[in-house]
Each structure stands twice: as structure tokens, then as C-alpha cells.
Image: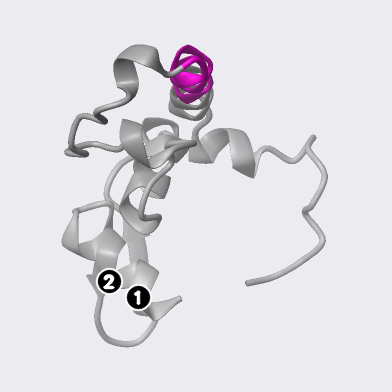
């Protein structure tokens, strides 16, 4: 957990508050945090296959890869979906999962 918080502070998503009652605060409203942004910081990759990762070398078999279009499509679905879910969406009370404390 500490490692994740450090990443979020380093990239400006959270700021630390010192002193009594200190802790961490969001730097933007919850509506301005797409889940995709947070996951890209905390996970190594969100892509379904390594050849689609940012900065990956071009696969020499890409031209004849029969599954590459499928993986590109799935990658786009992941990006589109997680780019439109925000922290505010996850905080809404009408969704389940509100009976635990972190």
C-alpha cells in the first residue's frame, strides 16, 4: 500500500498532509480521476499482450498474426471502459461493497 501511495504522490494524484489529522488528499475532484490513469501508474501494464505495450518493439510476426486484431480490439475496449470510470463512480453509495474499511 505504501508503494502505491508513493506513486500517486509522485505523479501528483495525492498530496501528503503533515501534522495532527494529517494523511493524504486528492489533488483533484474524484470525478477528474479516471480509473485508467490510476491503474497505469500502479500496474506494469493494462495491455492484454506484451506486443501492444507502450514502447514494445515491433513483433516480427505482426504482419501474419491472426490474433493481433482481436488483441488490439480488446486493448481498445479496456482503454475506453477504464477511461470513463472515475473514482466518483466507485464512491457512489448505490453500488455494493460499502461495508468495509481500508
- x, y (%) of residue 45? 38, 47
- Mark identifier at residue 6: 2
Residue at left offset 46%, top offset 12%: 69
- Mark identifier at residue 43: none
**Spatial CA span between label 2 and label 1:** 5 Å
Which residue carries the number 1 mark? Answer: 3
Residue at left offset 62%, top offset 72%: 102
Q: Tell me, yes or no, whether the highlighted magenta stretch contains residue 69.
A: yes
68 w.r.t. 59: above or below? above
Q: Is residue 29 visible?
A: no
Left or right: 57 as drawn, with respect to 20: left
Residue at left offset 38%, top offset 14%: 64
| Secondary structure type for disc 2 | helix
Q: Is residue 27 visible?
A: yes
- x, y (%) of residue 62? 32, 21
Type of secondary structure dominating the magenta stretch: helix
User: Which sits in the foreground, 20 or 84?
Assistant: 84
The region drawn magenta spans: 66-75
User: Which sits in the foreground, 86 or 27?
Assistant: 86
Amino acid at each position: 500500500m505504501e508503494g502505491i501511495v508513493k506513486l500517486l504522490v509522485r505523479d501528483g494524484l495525492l498530496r501528503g498532509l503533515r501534522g495532527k489529522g494529517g494523511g493524504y488528499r486528492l489533488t483533484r475532484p474524484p470525478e477528474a480521476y479516471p480509473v485508467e490513469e490510476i491503474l497505469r501508474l500502479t500496474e506494469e501494464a493494462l495491455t492484454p499482450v506484451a506486443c501492444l505495450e507502450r514502447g514494445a518493439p515491433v513483433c516480427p510476426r505482426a504482419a501474419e498474426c491472426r490474433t493481433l486484431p482481436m488483441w488490439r480490439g480488446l486493448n481498445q475496449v479496456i482503454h475506453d471502459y477504464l477511461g470513463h470510470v472515475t473514482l466518483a463512480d466507485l464512491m457512489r453509495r448505490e453500488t455494493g461493497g460499502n461495508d468495509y474499511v481500508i
